[in-house]
Image: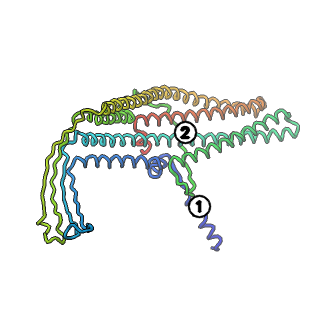
């Protein structure tokens, strides 16, 4: 084998290795590992877990170790030696701090649960976005096939008409009609190719293909030919929705924050204990560490109450209450919008199912119709305009069918998203 042939073979194998194929399942798994949005969601959950652990740790005793050794001098010197030495070990525990630490821990626990619900919801939402774009890509592939087939059929008919025209068999009117049809079909074909390329680029963005990647990405379309017409639609309980659970947690967090501010307007109680052991001045003083050792302990109850602050604490409490109500109103408005979306989804699914059935019947009729027209055309009983119209009607029926199939599958995925099951269903 010559060197040039060997180099060509190596180059071809390298090019093949740069092609990577993605179906819907693989695309979602890849997005989980590489998409910036998924990475941010996972990090947010990790942050909430760390904050919850820190809040829990504040309920436990704290042990501090302090050691100071060095030179401290003045001019004129006031001490016998310039050496300074201190060592102290202190164990402290805040038994009660007016409920602040425990409420902060409760807020951290709720925030952790909220982050987990939000992660699950966003994971399903991102999966829906990828699946919807995958369906759009699959639809564009089908539309491209239709336009390619349409362009091929029209071109062949145009060639036949051209021959007949130049032989004087067909009129100039028939020739020009088919020539314009070829131009229209070519424009539709160019637009269909562009739509496929755009949907490919959008899929690459959604799943997180690296900007520096040189691999050729190939997406495997979702089959749209044999879809089930039925999408089970049952009464959906809003309380089971992940967004509803997240909103209820946020309301509880908001109320706890109001309570923290309101408690400052009441007498504040603090109970703390501590034990410390330490020594000082044991370097170059003629005294050992144990000679100056000291153990101390404390158990302190502190009561704090503000009698007069020009109404600042009362106004802070009122502001907190108003902000809490505003935030709750926003949450309720979002839930009302969510409920409306669910109701509209159920209506849309029924309409899409009906459209899909009608589009399927229409496609069957148009296939039978074009078969009849072609037979009549070959027998000389149909005109060119009838054939053109039949071809256009068949292409239009195919477009309607595949569009309805894509809409039906999108509705099914959307329903699974609202049920919180889409991610698991797509990875089966």
| Image label count | 2
Q: Residue furthest left?
A: 291
Q: What element carries label 1?
A: helix
Quadrant for the N terminus in the image: bottom right
Crowding at label 2, few (<14), some or many (≥20) Cα neighbours within 10 Å? some
Mark 2 lies on residue: 224
User: Could you tell me residue 40's position as x and y percent?
Assistant: 43, 48
Classify 190 as above or below 14.
above
Which callout, 1 or 2, points to the residue nearer the camera? Answer: 1
Q: Residue furthest right?
A: 168
**Counting residues from the N terminus, which is met first, the one under dot 1 or under dot 2?**
1
User: Could you tell me residue 197's position as x and y percent?
Assistant: 62, 46
| Image side of residue 103 versus residue 179, left or right | left
Determine the residue positioned at 26% across, 34% down: 263
Classify 46 as above or below 18.
above
Determine the residue positioned at 57% across, 60% down: 16
| Image side of residue 388 versus residue 304, left or right | right
Residue 15's label in the rendered image is 1
Q: What element carries label 2?
A: loop
């Amino acid at each position: 084998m010559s060197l040039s042939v060997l180099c060509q073979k190596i180059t071809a194998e390298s090019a093949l290795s740069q092609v990577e194929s993605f179906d819907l399942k693989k695309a979602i798994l890849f997005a989980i590992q590489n998409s910036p949005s998924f990475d941010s969601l996972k990090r947010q959950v990790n942050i909430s877990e760390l904050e919850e652990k820190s809040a829990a740790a504040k309920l436990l005793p704290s042990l501090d170790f302090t050691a100071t050794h060095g030179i401290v001098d003045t001019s004129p010197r006031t001490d016998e030696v310039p050496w300074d030495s201190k060592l102290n070990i202190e164990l402290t525990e805040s038994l009660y701090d007016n409920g602040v630490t425990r409420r902060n821990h409760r807020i951290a626990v709720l925030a952790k649960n909220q982050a987990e619900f939000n992660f699950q919801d966003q994971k399903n939402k991102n999966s829906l976005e990828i699946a919807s774009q995958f369906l759009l890509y699959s639809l564009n592939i089908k539309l491209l096939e239709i336009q390619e087939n349409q362009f091929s059929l029209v071109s062949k008919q145009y060639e036949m008409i051209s021959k007949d025209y130049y032989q004087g068999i067909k009129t100039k009117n028939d020739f020009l009609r088919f020539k314009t049809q070829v131009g229209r079909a070519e424009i539709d074909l160019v637009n269909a190719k562009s739509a496929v390329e755009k949907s490919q680029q959008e899929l690459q963005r959604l799943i997180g293909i690296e900007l520096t990647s040189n691999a050729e990405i190939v997406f495997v379309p979702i089959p749209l030919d044999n879809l089930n017409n039925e999408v089970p639609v049952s009464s959906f309980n809003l309380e089971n929705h992940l967004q509803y659970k997240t909103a209820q947690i946020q309301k509880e967090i908001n109320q706890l924050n109001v309570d923290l501010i309101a408690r400052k307007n009441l007498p504040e109680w603090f109970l703390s204990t501590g034990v410390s052991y330490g020594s000082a001045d044991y370097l170059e003083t003629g005294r050992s560490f144990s000679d100056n050792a000291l153990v101390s302990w404390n158990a302190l109850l502190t009561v704090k109450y503000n009698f007069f602050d020009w109404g600042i604490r009362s106004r802070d409490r009122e502001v907190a209450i108003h902000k809490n109500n505003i935030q709750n109103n926003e949450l309720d408005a979002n839930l009302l919008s969510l409920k409306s979306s669910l109701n509209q989804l159920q209506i849309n699914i029924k309409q899409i199912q009906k459209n899909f059935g009608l589009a399927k019947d229409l496609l069957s009729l148009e296939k039978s119709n074009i078969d009849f027209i072609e037979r009549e055309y070959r027998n000389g009983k149909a005109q060119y305009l009838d054939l053109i119209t039949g071809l256009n009607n068949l292409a239009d029926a195919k477009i309607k069918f595949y569009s309805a199939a894509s809409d039906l599958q999108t509705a099914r995925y959307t329903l699974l998203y609202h049920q919180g099951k889409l991610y698991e269903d797509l990875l089966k």
